[in-house]
Amino acid sequence: MKLIADNLRITKPDIRMALKNYDPGPIQELVRKCARQGAFALDVNTGPLGKNPEADMRFFIEAVESVTDLPLLIDTTNSLAMKAGLLAAKNRVIINGFSLEPKKLEKILPLAKEFDADIVGFLLYPDSRVPKTEAERFEIALKLMDRAEAAGVAKERVIIDPVVPPLVWEDGIVQARAVLNVIRALPELLGFPIRTIGGISNLGTGAKDKVKRRLLEQVYVAMLASAGLSFALLDILDTDLARSAKVSVILAREEIFSWGMVPEK
Amino acid sequence: MKLIADNLRITKPDIRMALKNYDPGPIQELVRKCARQGAFALDVNTGPLGKNPEADMRFFIEAVESVTDLPLLIDTTNSLAMKAGLLAAKNRVIINGFSLEPKKLEKILPLAKEFDADIVGFLLYPDSRVPKTEAERFEIALKLMDRAEAAGVAKERVIIDPVVPPLVWEDGIVQARAVLNVIRALPELLGFPIRTIGGISNLGTGAKDKVKRRLLEQVYVAMLASAGLSFALLDILDTDLARSAKVSVILAREEIFSWGMVPEK
């Protein structure tokens, strides 16, 4: 399991202001912090963007790449912004992402072929509803892979996001377990070592108690690692969560152990 | 997953002194603390005991039961002490435990039939070596179940302990994963919902850095819960570990979630 920082989000006021003023400083500072924490990649979550999506995305990508060589996930539903990001980026890029939603099949998925890029595929219905059961998730995964193949995107390019549910949903906790089972079973179902990605912070959406939220995320990230998750998207600046994730990686992947591998407090 | 306190150990100086002087006070105090932390049961680890194993065990069990109705695991290799404990106990007792070691098959296993008690079966070779692979563990599990049946002990009475390895062993980390896989696969292999137990503190045996040790245990207990472990034997007075374990139980077992279920810091 590799750790991807979800910290670069347009929903944060200082990042929104930096983009509005085309001031790279706050973005660069945040990127440096995430890199120091050992992020494998950075999710660049610009949202759908406004009037100048292409120029905005170019600015954002250039600001990020001015201080890091890390791979980037471009996280926008705006296909113009996505293409501008892919054109601007020098670092390795992962498209985040497509689903069975017609607009995404039509506008986002083809970019994976055009730019020979990895692409995240969300296990969502065409109307963006979240499936309820494991069986529904498997069915959607098969359809996503068919769509990718039809668009000329190699199956090895697809990274499946089974969509971690908020626990406050009526059946959230049952779905959180379904997600673990799906991650575990997908490689066998699809017949090759498909990569998977999960957004940890989804789990605690709506929580008022931050201590409890963090504890749940720390425990769930261990379960995700043990289930074989390839990429954990998380707040890498949450030190306790990042440590749990790093220790989970050691327990889930390493062949030889030494105490020196465990991160210091 | 239910939490069993491993705190009542003869290896602790104050407990050893309490037993030597037949002073129930320190034992009672420790039992009360463990019960307050929500232990489902208490492991009474007297070790093999000395000159008066039967009287010593009777004293110990009576001291514990004077302040709690919780189930007890009697944890000794001394069959005389084990029988004395089973005779003395009023609370529900689980025998901890037997293995393929001839002395245990001969002296300990029959007590499960005689006292109609649950019994822990360790996945160890007859010479007490720890098996290396999952396949070896499965083979030993099948042999243990055969031996139990031959001794007239119902299979539902057996609780399998797959033996959590210390990470400092050369292949400890690989074995720690094998243990998870064994816990997950045993019910299907044996064809019924066999219960399993794991000793969390084994994982960090030999660690000098307590902070790192605790973090590893917190992560591993989440993985064990997710794998379907029935009973976690742990230091229930380690508050962070106990909270991780309780949250793991919520994520691994509950059907409905509310933030009120999560223990306070």
Image (cartoon, coloured by chain):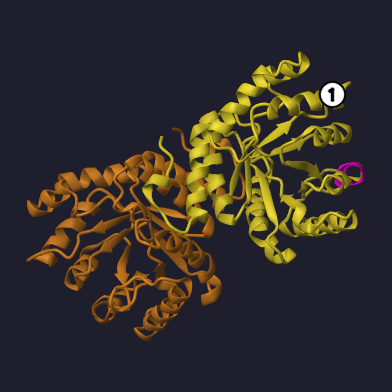
Chain colours: A yellow, B orange
The residue located at (26%, 47%) in the rendering is B31
The residue located at (37%, 83%) in the rendering is B147
Camera-nearest residue between B199 and A101: A101
Relative placement, left or right, of A200 versus A63 is: left
Give the magenta range.
Answer: A104-109
The residue located at (76%, 36%) in the rendering is A74
Name the residue that disc number 1 marks.
Answer: A55
Report x, y in % for residue B189.
Answer: 53, 75
From what the image shows, is residue B195 above or below residue A153?
below
**Magenta span dominant secondary structure:** helix
Q: Residue furthest top?
A: A21
Looking at the rendering, which quadrant does residue A152 occupy? bottom right
From what the image shows, is residue B10 above or below residue A25?
below
Relative placement, left or right, of B21 versus A6 is: left
Q: Is residue B9 magenta?
A: no
Looking at the rendering, which quadrant does residue A115 occupy? top right
Q: Residue furthest bottom?
A: B150
Amino acid under disc 1: Ala
Mark count: 1
Residue B57: tell me if it is visible. yes
Label 1 packing within 10 angstroms: few (<14), some (14-19), many (20+): some
From what the image shows, is residue B190 above or below residue A108?
below
Q: Which quarter of the image is occupied by the C terminus of chain B? A: top left
Report x, y in % for residue B92.
Answer: 33, 62
Report x, y in % for residue B43.
Answer: 29, 57
Residue B262: tell me if it is visible. no
Report x, y in % for residue B44.
Answer: 25, 57
In the structure shown, which secondary structural element does the residue marked by tag 1 occupy? Answer: helix
| Subunit bearing disc 1 | A
The residue located at (43%, 40%) in the rendering is A263
